[in-house]
Amino acid sequence: MARANFKRQGWKTPIELRAHRGGLIAFGSLATILLLVGRAELPLIDDVRMVAADASRAVLQAGSDAAGWASDGIETVSHAATLYGDNARLRAENEELLAWRAKAMEYERRIAAFESILEISYTPIAGVTTASVIADTAGPFSRAIIVNAGAQQGVRKGDAALDRFGLVGRVIAVGQASSRVLLLTDTTSHVPVLIEPAGVRAILSGDADGQALIQFVPGGVTLAEGAAIVTSGDGGVLPPGLPVGVVRARADGSAVAALYADIARVEVVALKRYEVINDVDVPPLPMPDLPLPAALPETPVASNPAPAGE
Amino acid sequence: MVVSIFSRFFRWVGGRLPFLIALIACIAAIIPLHLPGDLEMTPLYPLMVVFFWGTHRGDLMTPGPIFFTGLFYDLLSGAPPGLWALVFLTCHALALVVRDTFGRMLYSAWALFALTCVAACSLAWLLASLYAWTIADPLPFAIQALMTIGLYPFFGFAFAFVERRVVVPMRA
């Protein structure tokens, strides 16, 4: 009976069947152990992920190039149909924008004058790397992208990733020639932000629906729909003042950020690193509103001064 | 002599081809498509490969390659390491048990795949919920399962073609 069984199942010998069963149990146990050990979120796992990403880089690059050409082709065809209407609309828009440009230039002169009076210094940029997105791991587990620049191109952990419009996320792992950017919509992303014009501090966190939720707004504060959101620079990971989005109220009463960045279709990102505040391993400054012991010095972490302009 | 080494090498490559296709499927699953609309999910390409070769050519897709396919997919996709490895192994075993129990009764590869895929996504959802210790949103998993089931026939035919025209001649 047993002999007929292994033959019916396509095995040549009973040993083959037993080897298969043994393999299933052994590798199944190994996967379970990995899953349990992995809960500890060891930094090693991030390193191994980047090795895998580096190894797949050539295929990913080729695949995303092909996908890019295909979507460009579709776009060209669909644009051809609306060419005439687009042209008229762009002409009108251009006229409007020229008026805005004159205004912007005037403001620029005024701001420069004010800055010279106030002697403001901004967080200096240590470097910018432009990279294209070669993988999009928008699955049920993480919302992250892999870009084709890594340690060789000067990318560092903690760099801010921006597209043409605003903040996309930050670099969480760096490989040799690729790095992983955690998007603002990932559930493990928590970014301290400032909501203008009153300067309300809050935390922007990804939620399960793939939106960026505005959390921990101080009690009694109501956020105005359409108020601009920028990074606050608290915690020292991202510099202050990076454009994020605007406030949008949801039906359930919570507020989300309508991001400036086109996060679902981001193709190219600028990875910017900033001096002083870039070291993510520096312990965060104590919360200012906690009662501090009297003996504590005024600047507890000398190596991590608050960024200028805050 | 030279011919013999060559044919052995070809045989060896032919035997590793299913695993190679599985690894490429893992990479293909995370290539950004920039499609219009808000659909962010990609089909579970690696499951298609593991299922097809696991049920059709069990000698070429053994638990080892299945485990490493799952682990590679975990590492690339940002899932907890070991999660998809465990899911693929469990569903491979399930597919074999169902196939050998029901035999010709359920002998439509697509029906068997649909069952396997639903089991895979349910198990992934369960493990994700346990891992994060909150009830994960089941909708992305359901969409992923439907997309994968819907696309399987195309890939099934392609894999069958590769098996007949590439793997079998290489290993002859």
Image (cartoon, coloured by chain):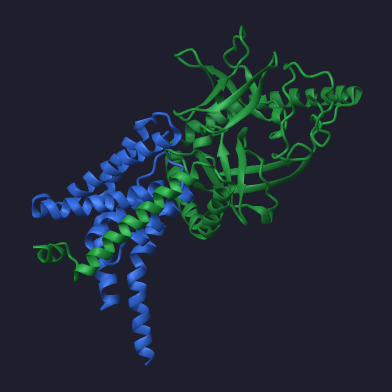
Locate residue A57 relative to residue B113 in the image: left or right. right
**Residue A244, percent from left and from top:** 62, 28
* Chain in blue in the render: B
Question: Does residue B80 appear anywhere in the picture?
Answer: no
Quadrant assignment for the C terminus of chain B: bottom left
Residue A258 is situated, as x and y percent measured from the top left of the image, at: 54, 24
Of A61 and A50, which appears nearest the observer? A50
Rendered residue at 26%/76% (across/down): B169
User: What is the count of numbered marks?
Assistant: 0
Q: Going by the image, does A26 lie left or right of A190?
A: left
The residue under the point 37% across, 93% down is: B1
Query: Which residue is most to the top?
Result: A220
User: Horizontal and vertical percent for residue B107?
Assistant: 12, 53
Residue A287, quarter of picture: top right
Q: Residue furthest bottom?
A: B1
Q: Nearest the camera: A216 or B24?
A: A216
Instruction: From this view, report whether residue B115 is shown above or below residue A167.
Output: below
Please name whichever residue, A157 or B64, is drawn nearer the observer in this view of the structure. Answer: B64
Tell me what residue is drawn at x 39 percent, y 34 percent. Answer: B129
What residue is drawn where x is 26% and y is 70%? B165
Can you say whether A270 is above or below B5 in the image? above
Give the green chain's letter: A
Residue A228 in the figure: left or right of residue B122: right
The image shows residue A54 at horizontal and vertical percentages of 55, 57
**Residue A137 visible in the picture:** yes
